């Protein structure tokens, strides 16, 4: 066999047990993908960490803002409570200090001030809300339990509460868990009824606080209590600080205009009074905005002329007359002599 024929012979297939050579092009592509996979994973991880960090920073900032707002409101109500306490308005002071403690249980001096407000209330200088029924009920405890259930069924919350008080006075251990639940149900629902249907805000808030002794308030009941407290807070500024009265009554009007009270009317009157104050201080545009709020809450026809006058004054204050561009008078040119 010649050398030429040897070079043209096909390659001998590998023997059993020998490895097949790997193609060079495919190996290069796979290695490139493997090298790229790790940086891509790092990039994806960096994006996830960055997004999570941004979320945590934003959440922390929102929490700090909320805490600052709560602290400001608590301090404001505490100061007003001190003023009420010094003026002998013990019931209103009690409500304010209890509200402060609910906002911040660690608020300095709030428990001590609350105790100072409760002393004259318990001594009889103010009329506390009594819970005991005036008519003795001599029925046995099992019959009282049935009477209370019937009262709850017909939504007679006051009768249910009075009956349960008598039952518990006779036998505090009788079906204690069920009686606690019935107390909660009666106080909670009477509180909502007083706030939402009867306009008895202070009494409704008091019932809510009694219900909380038997269990946490649900979201709906908590909203009713918050609206009532917000109304009382807004009402405390009427005639004293019109700007604050407008601010808080605007919140009440926005979230609970259906309160069985005069929220819409007081919002309108506060906005009108604050508008008058701004108009007298030389701010017709601010007054116009307040008059619009007042008319949106209550269409008071007697306010319309004043609102129109404020609008005209505001337009006049913002009007900028156009400036005339002076025209230059052409200077006559002298004709040269001999021309």
Image (spheres, grey):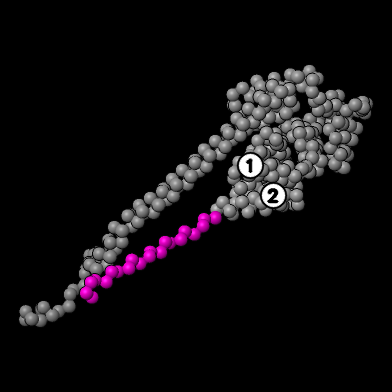
Disc 2 packing (10 Å; few <14; some 14–19; many ≥20): some
The residue that label 2 is drawn on is: 306
Q: Residue at x 53, y 39 (%)?
A: 65
In the displayed structure, would residue 176 be above or below residue 251?
A: above
Splitting the image into 4 quarters, where does residue 195 fall?
top right
- x and y percentages locating residue 103 in the rendered image: 62, 33
**Residue located at (39% from left, 54% from top):** 44
Which span is picked out in magenta?
319-339
SS at circle 1: helix
Using the image as rendered, state which of residue 207 and residue 305 is in the foreground.
305
Q: Main secondary structure of the magenta part?
A: loop
Q: Is residue 244 above or below residue 43?
A: above
Q: Mark 1 or 2 closer to N-term?
A: 1
Camera-side residue of 298 and 176? 298
Percent across and percent down for residue 258 are 75, 47
Mark 2: secondary structure? helix
Label 1 belongs to which residue?
A: 280
The image quadrant where one finds the C terminus is bottom left
* Residue 337, image quadrant: bottom left
Residue 293 visible in the current orientation: no
Residue at image coords 74%, 34%:
205
């Amino acid at each position: 066999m010649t050398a030429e024929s040897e070079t043209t012979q096909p390659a001998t297939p590998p023997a059993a047990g020998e490895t097949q050579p790997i193609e060079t092009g495919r190996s290069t592509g796979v290695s490139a993908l493997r090298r790229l996979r790790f940086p891509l994973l790092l990039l994806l991880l960096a994006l996830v960490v960055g997004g999570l960090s941004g979320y945590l920073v934003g959440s922390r900032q929102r929490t700090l803002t909320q805490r600052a707002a709560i602290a400001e409101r608590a301090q404001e109500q505490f100061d007003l409570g001190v003023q009420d306490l010094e003026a002998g308005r013990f019931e209103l002071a009690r409500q304010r200090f209890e509200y402060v403690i609910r906002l911040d249980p660690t608020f300095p001096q709030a428990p001590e001030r609350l105790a100072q407000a409760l002393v004259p209330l318990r001594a009889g200088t103010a009329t506390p809300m009594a819970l005991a029924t005036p008519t003795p009920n001599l029925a046995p405890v099992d019959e009282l339990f049935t009477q209370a259930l019937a009262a709850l069924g017909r939504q007679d919350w006051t009768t249910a509460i009075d009956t349960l008080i008598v039952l518990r006075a006779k036998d505090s251990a009788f079906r204690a868990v069920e009686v606690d639940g019935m107390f909660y149900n009666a106080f909670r629902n009477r509180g909502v009824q007083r706030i939402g249907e009867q306009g008895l805000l202070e009494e409704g808030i008091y019932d809510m606080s009694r219900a909380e002794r038997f269990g946490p308030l649900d979201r709906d009941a908590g909203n009713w209590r918050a609206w009532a407290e917000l109304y009382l807070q807004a009402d405390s500024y009427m005639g004293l600080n019109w700007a604050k009265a407008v601010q808080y009554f605007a919140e009440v009007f926005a979230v609970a205009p259906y309160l069985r009270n005069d929220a819409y009317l007081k919002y309108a009157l506060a906005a009108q009074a604050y508008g008058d104050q701004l108009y007298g201080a030389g701010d017709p545009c601010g007054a116009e905005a307040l008059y619009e709020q007042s008319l949106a809450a209550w269409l008071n026809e007697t306010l319309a002329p004043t609102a129109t006058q404020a609008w005209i004054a505001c337009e006049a204050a913002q009007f900028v007359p156009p400036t005339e561009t002076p025209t230059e008078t052409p200077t006559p040119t002298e004709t040269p002599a001999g021309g």
